[in-house]
Amino acid sequence: MAVKTIPENAPEHCPGPETEQAGKASACAGCPNQNVCATIPKGSDPDLPLINERLSSVKHKILILSGKGGVGKSTFTAQLAFALASEEDIQVGVTDIDISGPSIPRIMGLEGEQIHQTDSDDAVIWRGPKKNGLIKQFLKDVDWGELDFLLVDTPPGTSDEHLSITQYLKESGIDGAILITTPQEVALQDVRREIDFCRKVKIPVIGVVENMSGFICPNCKGESIIFAPTTGGAKAFAKDFNIPYLGSIPLDPRIGESCDNGVSFLDEFPDSPASKAYLNIITEIKNKLSNEKIGSLK
């Protein structure tokens, strides 16, 4: 049975974006997704078999999600990829479906090597169908080869891109999602919507990561709290929602420097408390993926 990928901000009687009534039913009136749903191809997508074939040799497909922008999601994706790929027997791929604001090319030192070439300072102003087409192209026209991990860096929130990637990967399977947040409540409240989205589209939650949990001075090693966890931070949040807490990563100004230079922070500064936190979290992720059950959909 096909999974209905209903967006979290849809009305109560949403028919589902893949149905013939999507964008046309009376329940769709006033929905912010109405125009997008009306343009999504209905019925069997002829490109899905090709996508499934391309990704058939990818062992684990993971979405990296955040409710709010600026919490370090792309940075985490890149450092996770660098760390996993540091093991000789592990092959890793990364795709960035944040069409309007891609960061992965710069963070991973790949600017100027894009197949889809745009000026890095130009704004990408596209409607849903064009975004969907490019995401599909990423999946079906790239020879991914044999990968242990394919990491999908997504835009903040739940938007066209999230619906598209869920639809295109539903047959080949998504292992789960990693949620990135910062400690303060204003960021956590948006992560609640991400969890709701995952539950509605049946994506397991691998766990939540608290980024920027404190500032560690590279010289004196003293810690300062920048974003106060007024409601208990990600650890309390994970407990309340019965999802795994993967760990916290402190701020280190050298992380930003590494991202700007397109190099692995973990390789450049292995003694940083942030590097050690990354490695602990990556170990947790590997352990979760080795288990049959990932996260909770209850």
Image (cartoon, rainbow, N blue to C red):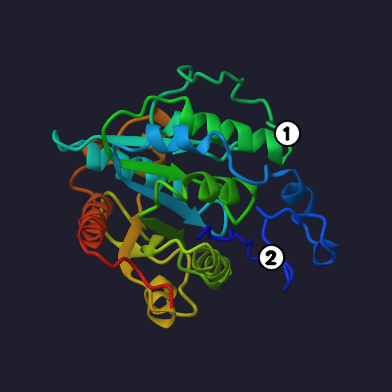
Q: In which quarter of the image is residue 161?
A: top right
Query: Residue at the location (28% across, 53% down)?
Result: 274
Identified by mark 1, the residue type is Ile
Please rate how many residues cluster around mark 1, counting C-alpha atoms within 10 Å: few if below 14, some from 14 to 19, many from 20.
few
Q: In this view, does 278 lie to the left or right of 19?
A: left
Residue at the (57%, 50%) spot, across then down: 162
Between residues 291 and 264, which one lies in front from this camera angle?
Answer: 291
Q: Is residue 140 left or right of residue 270?
A: right
- Residue 35, given in percent of the width and then of the height, sits at 79, 49
Q: In this view, does 75 lie above or below 137?
A: below
Q: Nearer the viewer, residue 161 or 221?
A: 161
| x and y, in percent, of residue 223 in the image | 32, 63
Seen in the picture, residue 90 relative to 197 is either above or below; the reply is above
For the image, the number of numbered tags is 2
| Image point (56%, 40%), residue name | 98
Residue 66 visible in the current orientation: yes
Dot 1 and dot 2 residues touching (CB under 8 Å): no
Disc 1 marks which residue? 125
Along the line of sight, which residue is nearer the eye, 176 or 125?
A: 176
**Residue 56 vertical position relative to residue 117 in the rendered view, above or below:** below
Regarding mark 2 in the picture, which secondary structure is present there? loop
Q: Position of residue 153 (x, y in %)?
A: 46, 44
Relative placement, left or right, of 14 versus 138 is right
Q: Nearer the viewer, mark 1 or mark 2?
A: 2
Q: In which quarter of the image is the C terminus?
A: bottom left
- What is the three-letter code of the residue carrying label 2? Asn
Name the residue beneath numbered marker 2.
9
Query: What is the CA distance from the residue labelled 1 to the residue labelled 2?
Result: 22 Å
- In the image, is 115 to the left or to the right of 163? left
> Which element type, helix, strand or loop, lies under badge 1?
loop
- The 10 Å Cα crowd at callout 2, few under 14, some 14 to 19, many 20 or more, is some
Q: Which of marks 1 and 2 is nearer the N terminus?
A: 2
